[in-house]
Amino acid sequence: MSHDQTEIKNLFEPRSVAVIGASHNSAKIGYKVLENIVRGGFGGKVYPINPKGGEILGVSVKKGWDEIEGSVDVACTCVPSKFAFEAVKAAADHGTKFNLVITSGFSEVGNIEEEKRLTAYATDHGMRILGPNIFGMYSAAASVDATFGPGGIKAGSVAIITQSGALGLAMIGKTAVENIGISALVSVGNKADIDEADLLSYLVDDPNTRSILMYIEGVRDGHHLVEVLTEVTPKKPVVVIKSGRSARGAMAAASHTGSLAGSDAVFDAIMRQCGVLRAESIEEAFNLCKFLSDTSVPRGENTVIVTNGGGIGVLATDACEKYNVKLFDDHEQLHEVFSKATPDFGSTKNPIDLTGGATSADYWEALKAARDHERIDSVLALYCETAVFDADNLKAMIRENSEQFKQAGKPLLFSVFGGAMSEEAVGSLTKERVPVFGDVYETVACLGGLYSYYRHLKDRSETVDEAEIDVAAIEEVIQGARADRRGFLLAHEGQRLMDAAGIALPASTVARTIDEAVAFAEKAGYPVVLKIVSRDILHKSDAGGVALDLENRDEVVDAYQAIMRSCRERVPDARITGIEVSEMVRAGVELIVGARRDASFGPIVMFGLGGIYVEVMKDVTFRAVPLNRAEAIEMMKEIRAYPLLLGVRGEERKDIPCVVDTIIRLATIIRKCEGISDIEVNPLVVYEQGQGARAVDVRVMLSSAEGGRSHA
Ligand code: COA
């Protein structure tokens, strides 16, 4: 356990808690926090602090810190913002380890300086701040409810970290209704000091926590978050809901918490890279957390749908496609397993249709067959309410099969649809933590989440792939541009950088004679392009200085002579260096590959469909750096244009390994060359397998001297 983790243990497992501003007035937050601590069964020492002294809830009130012996693990600050600094200072001076600053009125309303002052004092005196602007925290490990929530939190296995206070408080109520037990609930508010990553470093090894839900509005130190999540997800599933998805949402989030919502596409892709499941709604997040904390990870991906209705079976099949749940399709095996439970007019193709006449006994039989079959890994059981079904047995059938599947380590999820009887069954079984839902899509979304997690566990690799690049040569290029007081590279500097990074550009040379031009063209291969090189001829085409698509030796000779003649005629005094001969870029698939330093996630790479419509298509994806080849391949599979790389309409497969290599090379540049802030190759034209790719255009921006991006 690292020093940080040992330290953070004191937050989740305090031996003493102080409430600064513990009020005698039961309507006040300072009273409520104390009440929850006292009534929540906390076993450690409790110190209400209020200059008035006296007694609250039977606990003697301290008039000041001097009445408290020894240091306190956790203090909760519940005094108005104008008194908060003094309160925090007094706690820090007394050696308090953590301070939950519940008080609002700091960076979220523009009072940034006061927040900084308070945090700096705490940090300098070895005290860590949670908040400010929080509702507090609950930890099952110490039975401590230091929140001003409704109380009565049920201990359990789901940990919740939330940046929204109101939502967090509402979650307390919601978890009570749904009978979701909580291992920890932490409000992070303005995240002046402690952030999600600090909390995860405790939760990762907390035996009470089996799944983690995070509500995030903005990420500050994304790089650290990625590091920690990479350690957490192999051990426990993490589900995240991030607001600020739409442009309007992002603005609201920024003004709400004072933190900037990062680019959603970057966040989304990087969370996937870390194996974090992203939920669209709070409902979905709860469903996933509850399900994942109770279910074992399946052994494989063969899912079977058992239904008593054809229509709902088709709906579930569609949902499986949407949520990437793979249906077992070995028809022979399926027939063998399910023919006994299925009438002749039913279907043993997946979905297994027991038909509308199915009884609980038929479900029992089909589910038992699925449970016992070694090639079936998970089951979706759908039930539409019918008059022929023996309704009295519904709940028992669901409950008992659920239990047996749990014992067998196979996921089984039910979707029950119908009238009052069905609704009641869903409601009461949910409270018993049986995975049963009313809506088919909700059911399949849960299984889809489990399978994303399963694939992350199976496919993740800690290998980092790096390319060999000539860092010294790149640094030299950067220094040259800096000496010129530029924050960006010129075209020829960009080309030198590409050479140093081993990324292929269209081959070119400056020929000074016809023989040199022909020799290069023969070596590079036809067709080629010829262009005049002269500092005095800016508009090359106007001067007759360009010839495209030259197919053979004779055409090169003729074009060379024609260019020289024309340029000398039209710009008589021009100083001519020679003629540039370049390989003519053939048509291929135009991609974009980029790398940059993201404000919250640090170095990241981007890949997508390139060309001039990048902005319109937005068919791009991102990854945090470092990454490995497998991850680069995943990036390719994520974009909509991926089939173009596989070859459509009789075209050959494109050189995917070369594109992977280019992504890894850009990732290596951004990781090793601090001086570069953005680098973008667009288009990277990729050819058929084995024929490589060409970086046709490259743009490079340099970091400013302070480390940020400099604007050209
Ligand atoms: N040390 C100890 N106690 C102090 C104190 C100090 N330095 N200064 C004041 N107090 C006492 C007061 O005397 C009072 O006790 P009393 O009621 O017995 O007289 C108590 O602390 C509270 O002070 P008060 O001035 O009554 O404040 P309040 O309760 O109206 O508001 C907050 C305090 C923190 C609740 C309020 O400022 C706030 O920030 N509310 C928003 C909280 C919030 O929404 N957080 C985010 C949730 S997501």
Image (cartoon, helix red, strand yellow):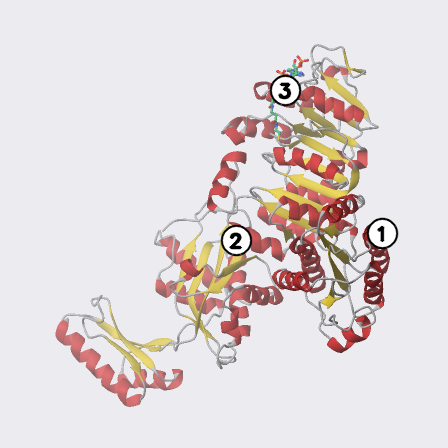
Dot 2 corresponds to which residue? 265
Dot 3 corresponds to which residue? 79
Give the camera-side residue of 140 and 702: 140
In this picture, residue 382 sits left or right of residue 116: right
Q: Position of residue 202 (x, y in %)?
A: 74, 42
Q: Where is residue 531 in the image (x, y as percent from the top left)?
A: 27, 75
How many residues crowd mark 1 within 10 Å: few (<14), some (14–19), many (20+)?
A: some
Q: Residue at x 69, y 11 (%)?
A: 51
Q: Where does the N terminus fall, quadrant-wise? A: top right
Q: Where is residue 248 in the image (x, y as percent from the top left)?
A: 47, 42
Quadrant of residue 152 within the rendered picture: top right
How many residues crowd mark 3 within 10 Å: few (<14), some (14–19), many (20+)?
A: many
Dot 1 corresponds to which residue? 396
Give the camera-side residue of 82 and 324: 324
User: Is label 2's Cβ within 8 Å of ligand 1?
Assistant: no
Which residue occupies the extreme bottom position in the image? 554
Residue 393 seen in the figure: yes
Q: Where is residue 269 in the image (x, y as percent from the top left)?
A: 57, 56
